[in-house]
Amino acid sequence: MSQPVTIIGGGLAGTEAALQLADRGIAVRLVEMRPVTPTPVHKTDGLAELVCSNSLKSMKPDSAAGMLKGELDVLGSRLYAFARACAVPAGGALAVDRTAFSQMASEAVENHSLIEVQRREALSLEEEAKKAAAVILATGPLTSDALAQDLARYTGEEHLAFYDAAAPIVMADSLNTEKLFRQSRYEDADDGQGDYLNAPFNKEEYDAFIAELINADRVIMRDFETKELFQACQPIEEIARKGHDAPRYGTLKPVGLTDPRTGRRPWAAVQLRAEDAQGQSYNLVGFQTNLTFPEQRRVFRMIPGLEEAEFARYGVMHRNTFLDAPRLLDANLRFDAPSRELGTPVHVAGQLAGTEGYCEAIRAGVHAAIAVAAELAGVDAPALPEETAYGALMAYATSPLTTDYQPSHVNFGIMKPLEQSLRNKRERYAAYAARGAIALAGYAAQLADAGLALPSEH
């Protein structure tokens, strides 16, 4: 192979794909536009920077998110290993110290002999393809305007931009711990070992907070329609507009919590999750927002215990660009139109491919790397079983039968039905997980037989 594989974008998907290919002995050129061209939400020029939450979701093996982590583990994901090494307490979830995580990923890439990092903005897919054996587009939801316009020639009017949101972060030493209590849901409030800080509302406090939240000034002065805003990232103020009690039955639900000051469940509660291993800052869980910075400071300080909160980062909204995957990509994330026109294999990975979630992006990096490695070796990549978590997501995201496509993450709702119907939810989820583990083992064996598995030293 005379030319390297060019990967455009140094986020989760691009970084994972680069390491996967390089570990298989394939030279990689990783193009990352930061810091030459900044984005509205990134704070550093580090690779694999987490910009929204620091949580990679549940570790429970019988959850869809847990199944996906099992795949990452079996397939040798480098970023999943880094996440485990940088984990911070988060109950049954995997949350990371985002600074340490990015540093570990950046060092792994920069120190790899087969990876060249170029800090520049990619402007033309055609120009990148001319000097590459293959191209992986992993530019994410913040694809630059210039590249997005260039991609439009291959997508027509089927490309789409909508809005995404990130939650604010507050400094730990600015919180009133006399009003907060530490507890994970359904755990003993008296043992002091919970992984979350909880800010409890009584009814009067909640009513006043919701009233101010609904009337606060927003950055983008418009009402968002469902098709323009991914539901998992709805701003907290938009949720409140759907009904006074909507946050109390969602993000602010008090179920499973006991306020030790009263011995009762609070009327509502905000959960705060540690951002770093030392617990120096906390993320307001589920508080994605479109409020102006002054309004965030004013309204969020109405949360009990946050009256003097110092904001390490305010919440922001940003454009989210993705491809209409069912019309444009195949099950191996191959982007057919430019691949045919340019004569160079082009694959898409991460959120640009129309999926959501950190682990989903990492898994896409693995998937795209395997597909590219197979093409370069002249072999067929094994079909990814629909019984696996990511296989189900790919089947959904790339099926021509999927209409009015909106980004999705792994979930049991898109998985292939079980042969035997189980009414008990816990038994059903366990059955999904058991079936997925068998399918994953078979897929891993097929990768090995095709010479596509990672070398044993990795």
Image (cartoon, rainbow, N blue to C red):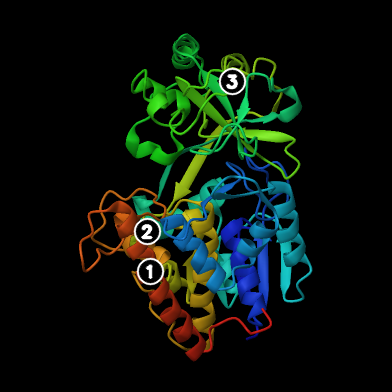
The kind of residue tagged 1 is Ala
How crowded is the residue under tag 1: few (<14 C-alpha within 10 Å), some, or many (20+)? some
Write down the residue under mark 3. Answer: 296
Point out residue 173 in the picture as x, y percentages from the top left corner: 76, 26
Point out residue 219 in the picture as x, y percentages from the top left corner: 53, 23
The kind of residue tagged 2 is Ala
Real-space Cα separation, disc 1 to disc 2, in angstroms: 29 Å
Asked where in the image residue 124 lies, by quadrant, the reply is bottom right
Q: Nearer the viewer, mark 1 or mark 2?
A: 1
Mark positioned earlier in the residue sequence (1 or 2): 2
Write down the residue under mark 1. Answer: 434
* 437 lies above or below 8: below
Q: Residue at x 53, y 18 (%)?
A: 262
Which one is in front, 182 or 167?
182
Real-space Cα separation, disc 1 to disc 3, in angstroms: 44 Å
Q: Secondary structure at mark 3?
A: helix
Mark positioned earlier in the residue sequence (1 or 3): 3
Q: Residue at x 62, y 47 (%)?
A: 50
Q: Mark yes or no: residue 200 visible.
A: yes
Q: Nearer the viewer, mark 1 or mark 3?
A: 1
Callout 3–callout 2 Cβ contact below 8 Å:
no
